[in-house]
Image (cartoon, rainbow, N blue to C red):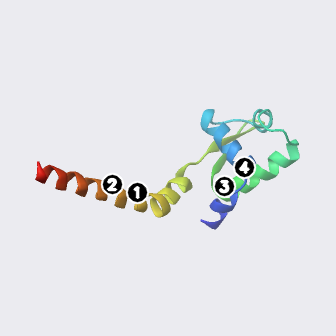
Amino acid sequence: MDKVFKALADSSRRQLLDELFKKNGQTLNELCEHLEMTRQSVTKHLLLLEEANLIVVEWHGRHKLHYLNAAPIGDIYDRWIGKYERHRVEALLELKNKLEEKT
């Protein structure tokens, strides 16, 4: 999970993930169109995203396509966000039930 947090810490990598969310299965050239950095820098960012399992690469002939893998983000949600949200929802339901009892 540390690799995921490290990968998400950089705004350029988050932008790459956003671009893959908009249109999954893009080549390096397509992804470079959305960023103001060198092709080599984009490649380095993509490698970090791949190491964190946030993207998956598939070869189609000579074309290397990058696909978003949202599973690690889902794991973060389950472990770090969902459990806190669950308590808030439970508190709201409890409040609603108490208010209904009074009416």
- Kind of residue sitting beneath label 2: Val
For the residue labelled by badge 3, is the local secondary structure a helix, a strand or a loop?
helix
Q: CA separation, marks 3 and 2?
A: 27 Å
| Residue named by callout 2 | 89
- Kind of residue sitting beneath label 1: Glu
Of the numbered discs in the image, which one, if any, rests on residue 8?
A: 3
Between tags 2 and 4, which lies in front? Answer: 2
* Label 1 vs 4, first from the N-terminus: 4
Of the numbered discs in the image, which one, if any, rests on residue 85?
A: 1
Q: How many residues crowd mark 1 within 10 Å: few (<14), some (14–19), many (20+)? A: few
Is residue 24 left or right of 59 when viewed as pictured? left
Q: CA separation, marks 3 and 1?
A: 21 Å
Residue 46 spot, x, y in % from top left = 75, 49
| Residue named by callout 4 | 11
Quadrant of res 35: top right
Q: CA separation, marks 1 and 4?
A: 25 Å
For this orientation, the residue located farthest to the front is: 102
Residue 60 spot, x, y in % from top left = 70, 36
- Kind of residue sitting beneath label 3: Leu
For the residue labelled by badge 4, is the local secondary structure a helix, a strand or a loop?
helix
State whether residue 56 is above or below residue 52.
Answer: above
Residue 47 spot, x, y in % from top left = 75, 53
Is residue 69 left or right of 87 when viewed as pictured? right
Q: Are marks 3 and 1 in contact (CB under 8 Å)?
A: no
Q: How many residues crowd mark 3 within 10 Å: few (<14), some (14–19), many (20+)? A: some
Between tags 3 and 1, which lies in front? Answer: 1
Residue 24 spot, x, y in % from top left = 62, 36
